[in-house]
Image (cartoon, rainbow, N blue to C red):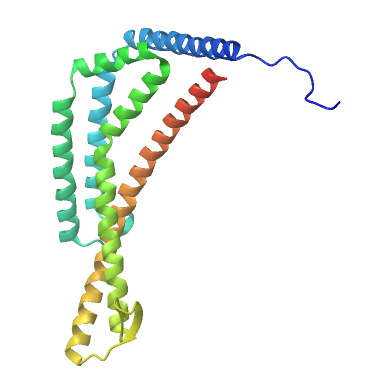
Amino acid sequence: MGGWPSCTPLTYVQLKRKFEHGRWTVWFVDSLLGVASVYLLLLVPADVWVWTGLQHMIQLLEGTIGWIRKNPVGLKMNHHVSESLAQFFSYHIFLWQTFVSAVYSKCVITAFRFSGILGVSTLIASVIDVVNLFTLHILCFHIYASRLAVLSFKALISLLRFFCGVKYNPLRKRVDSVSLDSRQLFLATLFLTILIFLLPTIGVYFLVFSTLHYAVYCLRFLLHSTLDGVNAVLTY
């Protein structure tokens, strides 16, 4: 008679023991690597390195803003708009520096060092959190610059349509024709000319801070990939 082939499957108790044994092995190896990492961190002045890195980051941002103020790559930038944006971002750098000075302490660095006792994966996750915290201002700069660039681009499109005698109808969700008198056409031309001359200044700030943002994003991606790789190696 036909039937299921004879075999000796693992019982539930054996599967449970195998799972618990693997889990404890992963935890032991993770903790061992974490303790080794803590030992290495205790041999180096990590707090001095972190603080020095933060100061270098502040100097880099201030130098970048100073470079933008000097019309980089021969671009003809609007002086008043460039100075306003430079002062705006410089003030946010000052706010971020004040925030970091309040948050930064040896207790935080000590807690970061000894987080490796919980495992090397916990230590890498702590590094990711520290990077996210200390690069929060770059994310804010990217958001500010991108919002300004998008707003300017939308205004440019609207003025170009208005200049060509058409406008977007949000109720019907289509482009309709519009009749303009000489005064309206003059104002549209004036605003369009002003915006075109302001676009290089806005574009430079957007390009610079977007580059910084995606550089930080690549660093975070590398750290997350390292964490996933460590977890995969420990699991399998």
Q: Quadrant of the C terminus?
A: top right
Judged left or right of residue 197, residue 13 is right
Q: Nearer the viewer, residue 133 or 169?
A: 169
Quadrant in which residue 80 is drawn: bottom left
- List the single residue furthest toward the right: 1
Return the residue found at the far front.
Answer: 1
Residue 130, quarter of picture: top left
Residue 117 image offset from top left, x and y in percent: 36, 10
Q: Is residue 9 left or right of residue 231?
A: right
Where 38 sits versus 177, above or below?
Answer: above
Residue at the spot 26% in from the left edge and 32% down from the top edge:
133
Q: Where 140 sits versus 71, above or below?
A: above
Counting the numbered discs, the total is 0
Q: Residue at x 25, y 24 (%)?
A: 52
Image quadrant in which the N terminus is located: top right
- At a point 14% along the width and 38% down the height, the residue shown is 94
* Up/down of 215 relative to 234, above or below: below
Would residue 177 be seen by someone viewing this image from the given angle?
yes
- Residue 71 vs residue 217, the one in the foreground: 217
Please identify the quarter of the rendering in which residue 115 is found: top left
Give above or below for 180 relative to 113. below
Q: Position of residue 35 (x, y in %)?
A: 39, 8
Of 224 and 171, which appears nearest the observer? 171
> Can residue 72 be seen from the camera position used here?
no
Residue 170 lies, in percent from the top left, at 29, 76
Left or right of residue 181, residue 4 in this image? right
Locate residue 11, reporting x and y percent.
63, 13
Q: Nearer the viewer, residue 91 or 172?
A: 172
